[in-house]
Image: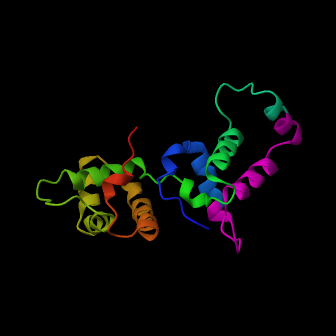
Amino acid sequence: MIRNPIDVANRVSPDLSALIESRLNEAEAEQPVTLTTIRAFLVGLLPHALTETEHLHHFDVNESLLDELDALIEEFGETALAIDFVQDVASEPLSRVIEAVMYDENRRAPPTLGAIKEAFFSGLVARLVGEGTLDEDEDDALLAEIDTLIARYGEEALAENFLRYE
């Protein structure tokens, strides 16, 4: 299987991205999960009458997940790896932590995910909780989230690429 050389995740809706990610987390397949695998899973979730109606009449103004997935399969092929279509953005609290590190006037280079994790252990999260920027109960989840991003992208990935803009 060949990985897509372009960032295709930014062309996927947040809902489809979340569905793909949840399926990847649950899948215990020996073979890589492809777009076709995700489509089969999605079709299996929908009642038969709904899938027929959906294909005959596009009554929904918004594009359905199945239609979006079909368009991706048409463009990138049935064997495209599903992992390439997962959007990775930091949660809102982690985005606040990343921004705090980015705007630190003592920082000379853009922060990496590894630098963000170091900031956790240097007391940044406690400071942000004290300032009211973060809630007290968010710190454990933030550490798990940064560890997940590091596991997937490595410590040297630029943290600003994961900022959530909402």
- Image: magenta residue range: 24-52
Horizontal side of 75 relative to 139 (left or right) equals right
Residue 146 versus residue 68: which sits nearer the camera? Answer: 68
Horizontal side of 62 relative to 155 (left or right) equals right
Horizontal side of 52 relative to 67 (left or right) equals right
The quadrant of the picture occupied by the N terminus is: bottom right
Q: Position of residue 52 (x, y in %)?
A: 86, 36
Q: Residue furthest left?
A: 106
Residue 91 versus residue 156: which sits nearer the camera? Answer: 156
Quadrant of res 50:
top right
The residue drawn where x is 80% and y is 34% is: 55
The residue drawn where x is 74% and y is 49% is: 42
Q: Residue furthest right?
A: 49
Residue 140 versus residue 35: which sits nearer the camera? Answer: 35
The quadrant of the picture occupied by the C terminus is: top left
Q: Position of residue 133 (x, y in %)?
A: 29, 46
Horizontal side of 107 relative to 129 (left or right) equals left
Q: Position of residue 46 (x, y in %)?
A: 80, 44
Quadrant of res 70:
top right
- Majority secondary structure of magenta residues: helix
The residue drawn where x is 51% and y is 50% is: 9
Q: Is residue 97 visible?
A: yes
Q: Is residue 135 visible?
A: no
Q: Position of residue 35 (x, y in %)?
A: 67, 55
Q: Is residue 106 magenta?
A: no
Name the colour scheme. rainbow
The residue drawn where x is 79% and y is 33% is: 54
Residue 101 versus residue 73: which sits nearer the camera? Answer: 73
Q: Is residue 47 magenta?
A: yes
Q: How many marks?
A: 0
